[in-house]
Image (cartoon, helix red, strand yellow):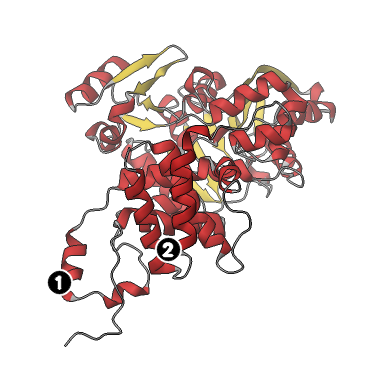
Amino acid sequence: MTDSRKLKIYKITKERELAFDLFSKIDKEKAYSNIVLAEIGKGETPLKDEENHLSDDDHCQASEEKINSSFVRNLVLGTLENKLLLDYYIDRFLKRDPKKKADDIRNILRLGFYQILFMKSGKDYAICNEMVNLTKKRFKGYEGLVNAILRNVIRSKESLTPPEGSDVDTLSTKYSIDKSIIALWEKSYGIKKSIEICEMSSERAPLFARVNKNLTNTNMAIKILKSQDVGATRVDQSERAILIDSSDQAKAISSEAFSDGYISFQDLSSIIAVDKLGVNSEDCILDMCSAPGGKSVSAAEIANKGKIIAWDIYPHKIDLIQKYAKRCEISNLQAYLHSALDYREEYEKKFDKVILDPPCSGLGVMRRRPEIRYKSMDNFNLSDQQFGMLKLAARYVKQEGSILYSTCTVNPYENDELIKNFLDADYSQEFDVMYERQIFTGEFGADGFYICILKRRG
């Protein structure tokens, strides 16, 4: 006999419920989106305790349903990338947040608004019904509010437009980027460049790959990928870089060309950075902040008769570096658990090349990690730590050796201003800037990135 108290099962696709859980984790717990989204499709879908009330037949049917991971990923990332603009629209319909469950209801509305306004599936009322059923299941009593607001936005969506203007507040809302970041860019680069950075930071990032010249060459790598039904083309900025066709990215990631070490996925700006370092085949190289290992392995592929030492402070990242090197058939790279802030006397003036890519604000990789868009720069300061690491790098490099200082950010205080301060602190008598460039987000498709090559005098 059926228990009359048994939970009613509302029609909700697993994708939308999963998207809500993942988005809420990122939003509430400030979790990294790349780590959270990497769990899609792994093991059991993390649904709530109510699923325990499903009958055996329902469980069987649910277990046979495959998660559309692409839909979940696009919904979570798209909502995250547009959070402030979505809130701007929501506030036109929601006069005040509920006294309870305010964050949860707002997140349901954010996901609903994003689907209706941006995904353009043409099934607006079906989306509304699913989000209402999700609310009814998880936050019973608020489904009427969600239903009314979503139906209103469906009727009004043609009249909803982003705010106009070029002041900091308006740009922050329009592009969903924290005001302090917009203010920093406006002060440093002017309003025109700031808007350009905002626009490019809202585009999807392309997928670049680095060719392992120890195992193949660029033209052959493209042919190998083509044989595996993956399109790729050369790029002008680096002989070792190729651009994967946007429609073939998933196939490229699971390709034998990658698993066999012929290519490695790395942003173009990072490939260029090691190119500019001018690595020689017998160089002894130190990478002070190596994980996930892209620059270390990239340098090792060139210095195939030399030696590379890679540091990181996390054991699991050391494991990642070692696996990366093994996949690329690199045998001259050794990874060690060590902090770049701790001096090693035995390494004084021992290295031909030193690579330093320290922890930074990451403003150049918003396209890949959209939670960075909401990072306040008001009290953010890593420049002291970065400066300390750079001073140690200067102690490790040989006479006539070179330091690569790089960051994945667009912030002069972590980049060119820091280098200026370094040279002003008596290092101008020992080092010369051989190459310096701020790559802005989207420039030749690359991430925002800073590169500086410092050469020690003889």
Q: Position of residue 419 (x, y in %)?
A: 74, 28
Q: Find out whether the residues at labels 1 and 2 contact each other: C-beta distance under 8 Å.
A: no
Q: Position of residue 174 (x, y in %)?
A: 61, 34
- Is residue 358 rendered to the left or right of residue 152? right
Q: Nearer the viewer, residue 213 or 305?
A: 213
Residue at 43% in and 31% down: 266
Q: Which residue is mark 2?
A: 135
Residue 355 sits above or below residue 152 on the image:
above
Q: Which residue is mark 1?
A: 57
Q: Earlier in the sequence, mark 1 or mark 2?
A: 1
Q: Amino acid at mark 1?
A: Asp
The image quarter containing residue 316 is: bottom left
Quadrant of the snapshot with the C terminus? top right
Q: Secondary structure at mark 1?
A: helix
Q: Amino acid at mark 2?
A: Thr
The image quarter containing residue 115 is: top left
Mark 1 vs mark 2: give the one in front.
2
Q: Position of residue 87 (x, y in %)?
A: 58, 46
